[in-house]
Amino acid sequence: MEPILRIENIDKYYGNKSNLTKALSHLSLNVDKGEFVAIMGASGSGKTTLLNCVSTIDRVTAGHIYVGQTDITRLKGNHLNRFRREELGFIFQDFNLLDTLTAYENIALALSIQKTNVKEIEKRVHDIAKTLNISDVLAKFPYQMSGGQKQRVASARALITNPKLILADEPTGALDSHSSQMLLASLKKLNEQLQTTILMVTHDAFSASYATRVIFIKDGQIFNELRRGNQDRKQFFDHIIDVVTLLGGE
Ligand SMILES: Nc1ncnc2c1ncn2[C@@H]1O[C@H](COP(=O)(O)OP(=O)(O)OP(=O)(O)O)[C@@H](O)[C@H]1O
Ligand SMILES: [Mg+2]
């Protein structure tokens, strides 16, 4: 199968000669369509940097990243904007909701821009709101919502366009365990039913156990990976915990 995402030998350096941080070095990774990949690793290991390079928020220092046939490290201007808007769904920790819009309006925004008809928008917003258990906050503005509610609204906004590639940085970081499970279950459902490809950074093995593959990053390089194969979620979880424990013991 043709991979949907090809990361080829990328470096990402921050700072200058006298104060250089090598956040990623010689990192390569292929992701097939329909994979749900979790990225784990210690704080500062380069997880967010990797996601930001794929999302084009950050520019790589060297190397190439292909999404489908497109080298996204070369995209500029309108092509870059269109790529972000049409191919990607972002779920970030700092929600990025628009303060002057209600939850409903925030979620519907991307569909309104695509000129989807109003009835269709209404149906899709209510469906996703139900899945993420935010139906009762749709009329509220961000300042009237809890952190977890904002996180779920931001997730709904990322998922509603059915993007090809979902990029999520600690999407359950601010959620209680019930909301976490609901969000993870809806990501898994999208992944299984629509073959949506997901790249999710997480520090917790429970979240990672929803994925089909877990990649471990250390000092800006991939040094291990686990595939779920035929294991059920609990077995995969135990397996992930074993690796995390091993790493913690170093
Ligand atoms: N804008 C920046 N300028 C300079 N250094 C940076 C910048 N962003 C990240 N770094 C450095 O790059 C390295 C990787 O950071 P990154 O944010 O990718 O880590 P992370 O794995 O996401 O960590 P965490 O689990 O704490 O979120 C760190 O050493 C960090 O200090
Ligand atoms: Mg991070």
Image (cartoon, rainbow, N blue to C red):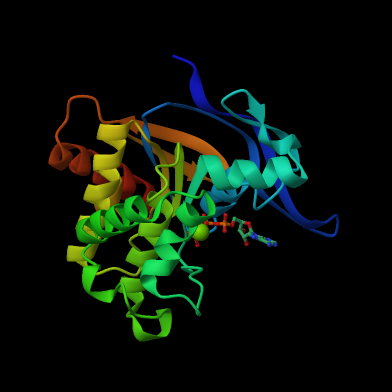
In this rendering, the count of numbered labels is 0
Specify whether residue 7 is in view. Answer: yes
- Does 83 sit left or right of 107 as displayed? right
- Does 9 sit left or right of 35 as displayed? right
Seen from the viewer's position, the closer of residues 190 and 220 is 190
Seen from the viewer's position, the closer of residues 65 and 235 is 65
Q: Residue at x 31, y 58 (%)?
A: 122
Rendering coords of residue 212 (x, y %): 30, 33
Image quadrant where one finds the N terminus: top left
Q: Is residue 178 above or below residue 209?
A: below
Q: Is residue 40 above or below residue 183?
A: above
Specify whether residue 170 is in view. Answer: no
- Does 232 sit left or right of 25 as displayed? left
Outermost bottom residue: 144
Seen from the viewer's position, the closer of residues 115 and 72 is 115
Q: Is residue 140 above or below residue 96?
A: below
